[in-house]
Image: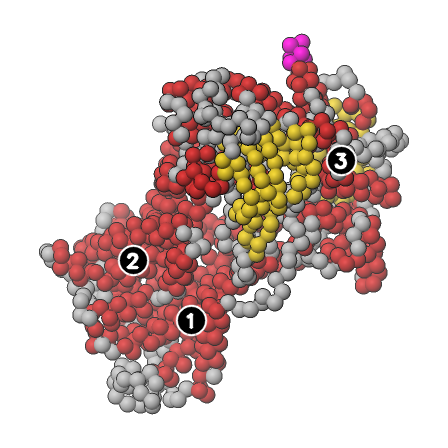
């Protein structure tokens, strides 16, 4: 089907996804370039100042560092597209094999946090709108202001200190392994998931409140009130269909934040996920791992942003029913 | 239509709507400060009999919309009804709680908003919304309600009445939406409809059709109405009686004929006589100060918004450029000032040829050609004082400094009838009329030969606008400056123009001296435009519509 | 509605309680940062006793993982944290606002290129891109400031470009252009005074972000390197004590939170004040 022959909504979504893929491609260049800005080279960084010239030359040849940058980039990109993320410099292991279980762990943790945070944020956002300028609203916005200013590790260690050390309800270190029973796994990630929820909750709630408030202050809500509709009907028939897109948008954007928050939280709880893997290898200056993990984080982030935009496009009646 | 018979019986002795000693207050919260209380409506009483139409008129801030909504027990924003009674069929609706109010709203009293485009839910089809309250209050079955809606669409002159209900709000034009909203209000067969400026947002040629449709619908259904507007000539066409409001208080209340023909209070007299400025038409001079020859302009290189436009402005005289939204009249101003360089044609100003682009013009060209904007509050830098705003052109063009400049600023403030006390004020501390006066002073400070006035009075209340027009005419005599006056309002044109250009779809369709342009025979568009402007006389609407039907019959 | 001359809120210039608390803490931290060598009871690296001694009259906050006085390290940490965060904020603001303003006023290809590049940079989470870059750059304070400042300038760029573009489209700027004013007048006299208040409140938010970003990096071991210490680094040093019930790590973490909340409260207050000055509707 030709682009011009499609309905505008299909065309817009196609455009958005194409743009996302292009963006991801550019991001891969940027990440690759970002690891090339050092005047020295990786082999020097790995072997240190005292390395012999032969050792340096050997390593350089082994890493393919004698080729020009763009060739190395395409070699790397080709590998990524075929699922081969390269070999870690430090451990000499296949990155893909090490990374997959960790990616799963991270997604599981993020998913658990999201299943709590999303409904909670929407309910609290609705409450704040319902009792606008009242005590509940003030409390909620005060909490939001505070918790956006708190570093993740402050919340994290506070929870560990009280719930793991003083009360000894939950483990302070989240050890998980393959084949772990589900309930044990849930217990292990209870604290990190709580921290993640708290980190993302405030922002999501604030944005949900703003999105719903924006709809509730529209003239058509007044029209509905002047028809004599009950509050619940107004919300169901008139507010909800218009609020759904902005709220989905808010949720997706915040899930993107959540993915980033994972990095610090995993380090706090020594949780074997992507974030800890990344941080470990940044301090070891293991460039191939950093590139691979960075790219995956960016891909998840961009993907969530695409979903947010597509949701907004689909929910817009002007696009669904063109003139 | 079978009505009234179905309604619950009520005491015939009492009026349909009676408002007694209504008092409405609002609390505004300024961040960091204590909440402030303002009285919006103070001690207003009125009575409305079945089937009658009461016009509520006043300037912005008069509290007319607030009273209209109070008849439904509704307060917008932080507005509260703090005193008085609203009796509907003899029962005080304010005393019946939320539950009781809900039974009244959309059932016995319905509302038509100013902007139908915003008042419809964008996510629902029109029919769903039109019949919603009829279904809610169990007035009709879905099938009956839809049938009734279609009949109303037909009566209100909507195209494709059978299918228009399946459309979404954004798929229908503004004038049509306003009619759909009227149908929505009529659909549940209410006793009373509150029309809140239903035609204000529409172009004048659309307004007349909507107005006629509303008037017919009121007559056919026998519904009573509160008709709220700031335009006395509009309300004179539809209402049986008129109440004039100012600052939340009643000024005068009487039969429409009495208000229009024999107003009792000074304020009403002023409202009635607005725009009746006497202006002696001047004859064209030998050589015009501005000559525009065949200019064509386009946005983005494609969309032609001006086509082959030619006009002349004579020294010390006023050319009014009149047209509806989208006619290209404001684009003409942008083309002359060089903000949108024309693609072809020539502009001669004070004997010199103007370069198309602003950047290449000499300081004198810039100085002698000034522009005054429609929205005075965004035309002034909010961080500069009145003194700086008026003083800057003096510094910039004439190199005036210190006391010399301050002296001239004071002179200019005098000329615009504002005292020296305003020098240190910021724009936010001025009223709408004062802001526009400062903009006029800023233009005058450059000692221009020509001022382009772009809709300078259309954002102002009628009396304030009147003051601005009188000031402009007086200044024209003193400073001998020419005006190119862009407006959509023919009453303004009649008040101040020496010659007129009528624009339609980017072209000048009629051009000449005021007398020539306003004397028949007319071309089709000018005829439509002229016949659409409401006049402050009873029965104008009927004769205008009749004249129009005859014309279209003749075609 | 016509704007009747707004009543002046005289005699109501009192500072709300939240902002007052914020100002107090900001003052306290700035004082500690400025006069660190004078008020600190012990030098930065001096070992004064046992590891993780509890709070006492002699050592108000106890000692850290190496037996150094925690209060002294907190005071020096304030200096490092605030200095680096402030420098990064200054860099991001200068870079972002100059480029953003220029893009808005000049427009054309410059605007196009800059804006697309910023879109690209912002499509990667800041922390992730920061980690990628820091994996190859030398770990020192200058690098940190440069990386943090550059990455964060994208946000300032977007904001200042949007604000300036909004103002640039207003009639009073057009009036100035019609008068024949040059670009400098338009940027500095017409646009800048009106762009200031949104930018000032953004300044607070950017500073908070810089503090949190720096702390996160140091906590991950990629920010300020020992023996230098910032608060984030001190959390890292003392975090292993937590599982033994030693709360030393919570003190620097709490200080970061207190600083961020204080700046937030003050920025919020300034923003509200300026919007009420403009007669805006405030927070709807």
Residue under label 1, please give it.
C259
Q: In the figure, is residue A217 to the left or right of B20? A: left
Judge from the rendering whether residue C269 lies leftward or rightward of residue A69; answer left or right: right
Instruction: Kindly identify the residue that appears in the image at 83 percent across and 49 percent down.
Output: B415
**Magenta stretch, residue numbers:** B549-555
Q: Where is residue C155 in the image (x, y as percent from the top left)?
A: 46, 57
Q: Which marked residue is nearer to the observer: mark 3 or mark 1?
A: 3
Q: The residue marked by circle 1 belongs to what chain? A: C
Q: Where is residue C146 in the image (x, y as percent from the top left)?
A: 44, 67
Chain of residue at mark 2: A
SS at mark 3 in the image: loop
- Residue position for label 3: B264
Nearest to the eye among marks 3 and 2: give it: 3
Q: In which quarter of the image is residue B295?
A: top right
- Spot occupied by residue B140 in the image (x, y as percentages of width and height): 39, 23
Q: How far apart are marks 3 and 2 (CA)?
A: 69 Å
């Amino acid at each position: 089907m030709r682009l011009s022959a499609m309905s505008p909504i299909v065309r817009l979504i196609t455009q958005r996804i194409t743009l996302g893929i292009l963006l991801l491609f550019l991001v891969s260049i940027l990440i690759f370039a970002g690891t090339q800005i050092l005047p020295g080279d990786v082999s020097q960084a790995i072997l240190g100042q005292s390395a012999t010239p032969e050792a340096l030359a050997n390593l350089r040849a082994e890493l393919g560092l004698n080729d020009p940058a763009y060739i190395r980039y395409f070699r790397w990109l080709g590998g990524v597209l075929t699922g081969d993320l390269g070999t870690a410099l430090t451990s000499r292991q296949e990155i893909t094999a090490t990374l997959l279980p960790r990616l799963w762990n991270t997604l599981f943790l993020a998913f658990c946090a999201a299943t709590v945070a999303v409904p909670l944020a929407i309910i609290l956002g609705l409450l704040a709108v319902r009792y606008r300028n009242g005590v509940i609203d003030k409390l909620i916005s005060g909490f939001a202001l505070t918790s956006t200013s708190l570093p993740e590790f402050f919340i994290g260690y506070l929870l560990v200190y009280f719930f793991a050390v003083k009360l000894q309800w939950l483990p302070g270190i989240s050890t998980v392994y393959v084949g772990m029973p589900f309930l044990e796994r849930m217990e292990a990630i209870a604290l990190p998931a709580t921290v993640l929820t708290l980190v993302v909750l405030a922002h999501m709630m604030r944005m949900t409140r703003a999105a719903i408030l924006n709809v509730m202050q529209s003239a058509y809500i007044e029209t509905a009130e002047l028809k004599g509709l009950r509050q619940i009907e107004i919300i169901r028939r008139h507010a909800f269909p218009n609020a759904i897109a902005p709220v989905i948008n808010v949720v997706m954007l915040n899930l993107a934040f959540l993915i980033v928050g994972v990095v610090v939280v995993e380090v706090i709880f020594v949780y074997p996920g992507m974030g800890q893997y990344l941080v470990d290898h940044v301090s070891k200056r293991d460039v191939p791992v950093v590139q691979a993990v960075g790219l995956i984080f960016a891909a998840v982030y961009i993907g969530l942003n695409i979903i947010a935009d597509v949701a907004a496009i689909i929910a817009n009646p002007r696009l669904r029913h063109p003139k | 239509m079978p009505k009234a018979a179905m309604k619950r019986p009520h005491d015939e002795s009492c009026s349909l709507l009676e408002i007694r000693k209504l008092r409405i207050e609002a609390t505004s919260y300024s961040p960091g400060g204590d909440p402030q209380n303002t009285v919006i409506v103070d001690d207003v009483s009125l009575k409305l009999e079945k089937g009658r139409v009461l016009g509520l008129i006043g300037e912005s801030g008069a509290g007319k919309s607030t009273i209209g909504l109070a008849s439904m027990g509704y307060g917008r924003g932080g507005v509260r009804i703090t005193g008085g009674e609203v009796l509907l069929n003899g029962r005080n609706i304010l005393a019946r709680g939320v539950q009781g109010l809900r039974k009244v709203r959309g059932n016995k009293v319905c509302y038509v908003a100013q902007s139908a485009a915003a008042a419809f839910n964008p996510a629902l089809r029109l029919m769903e919304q039109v019949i919603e309250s009829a279904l809610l209050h169990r007035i009709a079955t879905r099938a009956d309600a839809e049938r009734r809606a279609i009949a109303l669409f037909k009566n209100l002159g909507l195209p494709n009445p059978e299918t228009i209900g399946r459309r979404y709000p954004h798929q229908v034009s503004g004038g049509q939406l306003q009619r759909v909203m009227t149908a929505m209000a009529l659909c549940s067969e209410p006793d009373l409809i509150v029309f809140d400026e239903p035609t204000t947002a529409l172009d004048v040629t659309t307004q007349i059709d909507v107005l006629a449709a509303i008037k017919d619908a009121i007559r056919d259904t026998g519904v009573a109405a509160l008709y709220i507007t700031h335009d006395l000539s509009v309300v004179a066409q539809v209402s049986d009686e008129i109440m004039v409001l100012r600052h939340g208080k009643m000024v005068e209340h009487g039969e429409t004929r009495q208000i229009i023909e024999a107003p009792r209070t000074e304020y009403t007299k002023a409202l009635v006589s607005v725009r009746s400025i006497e202006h002696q038409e001047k004859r064209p001079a030998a050589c015009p100060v501005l000559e525009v020859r065949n200019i064509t302009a386009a946005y983005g290189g494609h969309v032609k918004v001006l086509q082959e436009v030619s006009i002349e402005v004579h020294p010390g005289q006023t050319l009014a450029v009149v047209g509806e939204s989208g006619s290209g009249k404001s684009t003409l101003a942008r083309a002359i000032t060089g903000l949108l360089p024309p693609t072809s044609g020539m502009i001669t100003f004070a004997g010199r040829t103007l370069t198309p682009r602003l950047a290449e013009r000499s300081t004198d060209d810039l100085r002698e050609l000034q522009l005054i904007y429609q929205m005075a509050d965004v035309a002034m830098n909010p961080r500069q004082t009145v003194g700086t705003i008026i003083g800057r052109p003096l510094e910039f063009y004439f190199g005036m400094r210190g006391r010399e400049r301050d002296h001239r600023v004071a002179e200019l403030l005098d000329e615009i009838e504002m005292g020296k006390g305003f020098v240190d004020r910021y724009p936010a501390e001025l009223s709408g009329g004062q802001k526009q006066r400062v903009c006029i002073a800023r233009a005058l400070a450059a000692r221009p030969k020509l001022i382009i006035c772009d809709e300078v009075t259309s954002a102002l209340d009628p009396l304030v606008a009147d003051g601005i027009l009188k000031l402009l005419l007086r200044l024209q005599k003193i400073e001998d400056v020419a005006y190119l006056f862009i407006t959509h309002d023919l009453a303004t044109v009649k008040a101040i123009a020496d010659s007129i250009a009528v624009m339609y779809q980017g072209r000048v369709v009629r051009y000449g001296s005021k007398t020539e342009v306003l004397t028949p025979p007319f071309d089709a568009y000018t005829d439509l435009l002229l016949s659409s402007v409401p006049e402050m006389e009873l029965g104008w609407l009927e004769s205008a519509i009749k004249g129009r039907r005859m014309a279209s019959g003749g075609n | 509605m016509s704007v009747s001359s707004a009543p002046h809120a005289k005699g109501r210039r009192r500072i709300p309680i939240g902002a007052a608390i914020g100002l107090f803490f900001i003052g306290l931290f700035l004082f500690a940062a400025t006069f660190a060598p004078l008020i600190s009871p012990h030098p930065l690296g001096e070992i004064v006793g046992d590891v993780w001694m509890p709070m006492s009259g002699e050592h108000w906050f106890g000692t850290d993982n190496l037996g150094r006085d925690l209060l002294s390290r907190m005071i020096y940490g304030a200096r490092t944290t605030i200095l680096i965060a402030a420098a990064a904020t200054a860099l991001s603001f200068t870079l972002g606002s100059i480029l953003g303003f220029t893009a808005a006023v000049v427009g054309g290809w410059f605007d196009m290129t800059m804006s697309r590049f910023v879109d690209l940079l912002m499509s990667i989470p800041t922390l992730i891109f920061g980690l990628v870059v820091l994996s190859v750059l030398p770990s020192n304070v200058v690098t940190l400031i440069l990386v943090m400042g550059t990455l964060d300038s994208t946000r300032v760029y977007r904001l200042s470009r949007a604000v300036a573009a909004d103002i640039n489209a207003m009639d009073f700027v057009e009036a100035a252009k019609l008068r024949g004013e040059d670009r400098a007048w338009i940027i500095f006299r017409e646009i800048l005074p009106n762009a200031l208040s949104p930018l000032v409140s953004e300044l607070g938010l950017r500073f908070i972000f810089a503090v949190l970003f720096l702390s996160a990096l140091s906590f991950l071991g990629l920010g300020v390197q020992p023996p230098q210490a910032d608060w984030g680094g001190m959390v890292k040093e003392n975090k292993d004590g937590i599982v033994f019930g030693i709360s030393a790590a919570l003190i620097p973490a709490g200080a970061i939170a207190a600083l961020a909340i204080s700046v937030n409260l003050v920025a919020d207050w300034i923003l509200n004040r300026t919007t009420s000055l403009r007669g805006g509707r405030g927070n709807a």
